[in-house]
Image (spheres, rainbow, N blue to C red):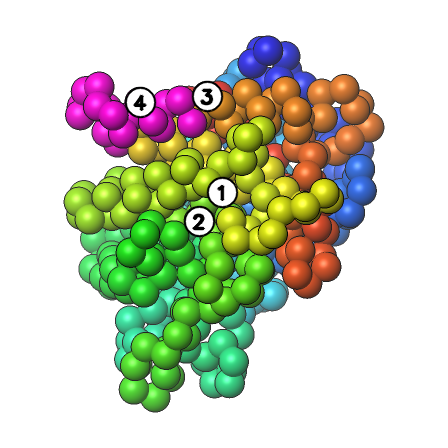
Amino acid sequence: MWNTAIKDALVKLRQNIVKHPGMLPHIIEGQCYEWGENNDWIEGFYTGMMWLAYEYGQDTFYKESAEAYLANFRERLEKHVALDHHDIGFLYSLSAVAEWRVTGNEEARQVALKAADTLLHRWRPQIGIIQAWGLEDDPENGGRMIIDCLLNLPLLFWAYEQTHDQRYYDVAMQHALISEKFLVRGDGSSYHTFYFDRANGNAIRGGTHQGYQDGSTWTRGQAWGIYGFALAYRYTKHEAFLDTSKRLAKYFIEHMPEDDVVYWDFDVPVEEGTPRDSSASAITACGLLELLELTADEGDNSSRQLFEEALDRTMRSLVERYATMNLPDAEGLLKHGSYHVRGDRAPDDYMIWGTTSIWKPWCG
Ligand code: GLY
């Protein structure tokens, strides 16, 4: 089953590259991606997949395809196209950093370092966070952070490793600490977003943007938290981040529905037709794999067993029930992802980040 799934993933990726040269997939509704320019938060997922495909089989088609996008990512940065948000890590870790890691290309390294500098501009020292969205004086978003930002931090930790410039490390570390304090609740569930007073940094309240309601747990946010805190631990070795990732993972696993792929929010009333978010489960699979790698020397313990079983159940369900292997025209790999159900944006479609995440466990 896994071999067939990998083969299908490679075929679909190749088809997409050949069919849409130079374009990038955006949020979609239906069987096909909407293809466009490099001006959203998600374009890195596509190049990230190409690098994973190349690493998996050493087929230079994928390497050359990914390399062809570097100039495009560099130009976006130079012209600051649609970059007034924190998702610079999502964009550049999976494009420029990935290219540097695989090929050692110095130009890619320089682009990635410039991207890290751009991300630093979103640091709000009076609060200790990287602001998620909008400009500094934005009345709604000026003092707001979101859990997804944890996946932007590896770009800063990587930049610190490269340059030994302490600013990158301190900003990422401080943001992760504040995320842990305010976004993660006592029972291991999470807020999607948190508001602070811009003037004095005082905490105001938790809330949501894409979840069901302010106190609920948006499943994809929880998934970003599992993966993000595990990655923060990988870079910092700060034990509390590992524990936090495990707590979030346990909450996620305890609330998995019977087919093992989650609905879009853990607190939404489930009735016929309630949308799932397969991408949340795919991201969680990445997070569980990361946790298993990070705890390998802990030997066999009950947490590791729980994570191994949940990873297996999740991947089986995604491949058997959600993969598009029997839909040759489908451009995405996973059905039933949800971008923003409450906002009525792509509530039951292919999410490029779900398509990318399902690769990780099998690409080593
Ligand atoms: N980071 C945005 C999302 O997961 O929708």
Q: Are marks 3 and 4 in contact (CB under 8 Å)?
A: no
The residue nearer to you, when weighing 215 against 16, is 215
Is residue 267 at least partly visible in the picture?
A: yes
Vertical order, 330 against 30 (above or below): above
Q: Amino acid at mark 1?
A: Leu
First in sequence: mark 3 vs mark 4: 4
Rounded to the nearest angstrom, the CA distance separating label 2 from label 3 is: 19 Å
Rounded to the nearest angstrom, the CA distance separating label 2 from label 1 is: 21 Å
Magenta residues (range): 294-310
Q: Are marks 1 and 4 in contact (CB under 8 Å)?
A: no
Q: Amino acid at mark 3?
A: Asp
Provide the residue designation for mark 2. 222
Give the image location of residue 176, x and y in percent: 29, 57
Give the image location of residue 150, x and y in percent: 38, 53
Could you tell me which quadrant the N terminus lies in? top right
Rounded to the nearest angstrom, the CA distance separating label 1 from label 4 is: 30 Å
On the rendered structure, is 247 left or right of 274? left
First in sequence: mark 3 vs mark 1: 1
Is residue 73 at least partly visible in the picture?
A: no
Q: Amino acid at mark 2?
A: Gln
- Looking at the rendered structure, the secondary structure element under dot 2 is helix
Provide the residue designation for mark 4. 305
The label number, if any, that marks residue 94 in the structure image: 1
The label number, if any, that marks residue 56 in the structure image: none
Name the residue rendered at 69%, 34% in the picture. Answer: 335
Q: How many marks?
A: 4
On the rendered structure, is 6 left or right of 160? right
Q: Amino acid at mark 4?
A: Gln
